[in-house]
Image: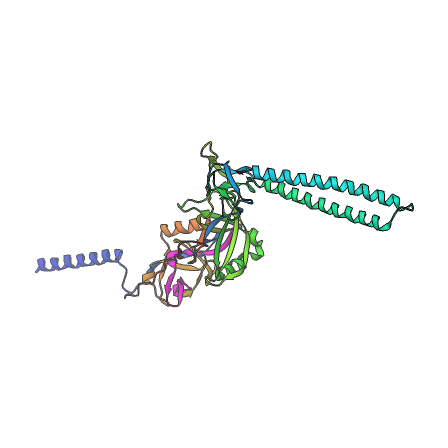
Amino acid sequence: MHLARRSAALVAVAAIALAVTDGAFAQQPNAPPAVGVIEVVKRPITETSEFLGRIEAVNRVSVVARVTAFLDKRLFNEGAEVKTGDPLYKLERGPFEADLAAKQAQVAQLQATLTNAKLTTDRQRTLLSGPAGQQSNYDAAVANQKSLEAQVEAAQAQVSLSKINLDYTDIRSPIDGRIGRTSVTEGNVVSPSSGVLTTIVSQDPMYVTFPVPVREALSLRERYATKGGYGAVVIHLKLPDGRTYGQTGHLNFASNTITQTTDTLLVRGEIPNPLLYPTSNTGGTVRELTDGEFVTVLLEGVQPVEVLAIPRSAVLSDQQGDYVLLVGAGNKVEQRRVKLGQSTSTIASIINGLSLGDKVIAEGLQRARPGQVVAPAPAGSEIQAIMKRAEQGGSVSTPAPNTSAPGAPGSNPAAAPATKTPDTGK
């Protein structure tokens, strides 16, 4: 009997100890769910919009022959950089030199005839004062002199034209730039109808042109028009291999017409393209940007702006749009619709819907429901580190829109930020 009572007492003690142990590690069934919250903070950001564009030379010249002649010599290295006035081609000069000499001889002959006509006119003027003079003879002499003077001027104009044609046999570069390959070799006859002999494109600076969707163009205008317009942004480029170009540029032109087929506005900027190093003693050079190159254009605001920021993981989505869950009065969960600005994969910028100091649920979202009482606690170290980096500021960008750059072979659709829907499982 005594042994039975002792055994029952030991069982009771063990049960009590087990209950105490379970209570230390398990939440009571009726206790509010624990959630991790983070306060909304202000974050300085540099706003950046991303587009697809093409590099274009500021100056482009198609070199053609101005006269018909044999091509005697090519005087440049294909692919080299040339300066204004550098000789490119030499055409056969003999026929043009002979034509110039003939025209000059004709001028000399007419000038000799004009000299005699002037003497005749002076003689007839002298005779008018005596009985042998006749007015008709004098008038004829004056008319003949004037006719010869006109013929001399016409012959001199022909001499000038012959000199121009002779000068055209030396084809020189009209601009500084990089020259392409020649389409005609020595010994061929060239003429104005022969087509382009070669092409020269300027190298520094370069244009970058890119189409901006009208909706985005209106947003950019609203954002920067009162902050300096073109001067409120700078241009950065990403090269085709993913590298960031080391030079910055500026906007200088926006088209006055919307492209109806794509509903975009063509915008242009200018950016330096300095020489990196010469490739050889033949005149070849290396520069980062090449005419026609396909690049990614980043329009970056000069001055940073402050926006409200929360962890990107705290933003939820449904068919009505984006929203967050807050801890309000009495630790009750509230649903709040928000409008996102430019965001990253870790930080969401909030345009409206939240206020500074609001407590947003960042952890335990699957356990929180609107109107439910929760047990809030500061979010974990990972979320805290994300918000710490957010307070230090940075650059965020809007991906390139789904439009093709001028002449681009394809398009690059904008990557939408990842969103998630809370787990509604019970």
When the figure is inspected, residue 349 is found, relative to residue 62, above or below; the finding is: below
Side of 87 where 383 appears, left or right: left
Q: Would residue 45 be visible to someone looking at this image?
A: no
Number of marks in the rendered image: 0
Q: Would residue 15 be visible to someone looking at this image?
A: yes
Determine the residue positioned at 42% across, 53% down: 408
Q: Residue furthest top?
A: 281
Q: Residue furthest left?
A: 1
- Residue 183 lies within the magenta run: no
User: Which quadrant holds residue 20?
Assistant: bottom left
Side of 287 where 119 appears, left or right: right
Residue 396 in the image: x percent, y percent? 45, 52
- Which scheme is used to colour this image of the protein? rainbow
- Residue 322 lies within the magenta run: yes
Residue 90 in the image: x percent, y percent? 53, 37
Residue 377 in the image: x percent, y percent? 37, 56
Determine the residue positioned at 78% across, 49% down: 143
Classified by dominant secondary structure, the portion drawn in magenta counts as strand
Q: Quadrant of the C terminus?
A: bottom left
Q: Residue furthest front?
A: 132
Residue nearest the observer in this picture, 411 or 352: 411
Residue nearest the observer in this picture, 94 or 50: 94
Q: Quadrant of the N terminus?
A: bottom left
Write down the region rendered in magenta.
304-333
Residue 263 in the image: x percent, y percent? 47, 62
Residue nearest the observer in this picture, 205 or 130: 130
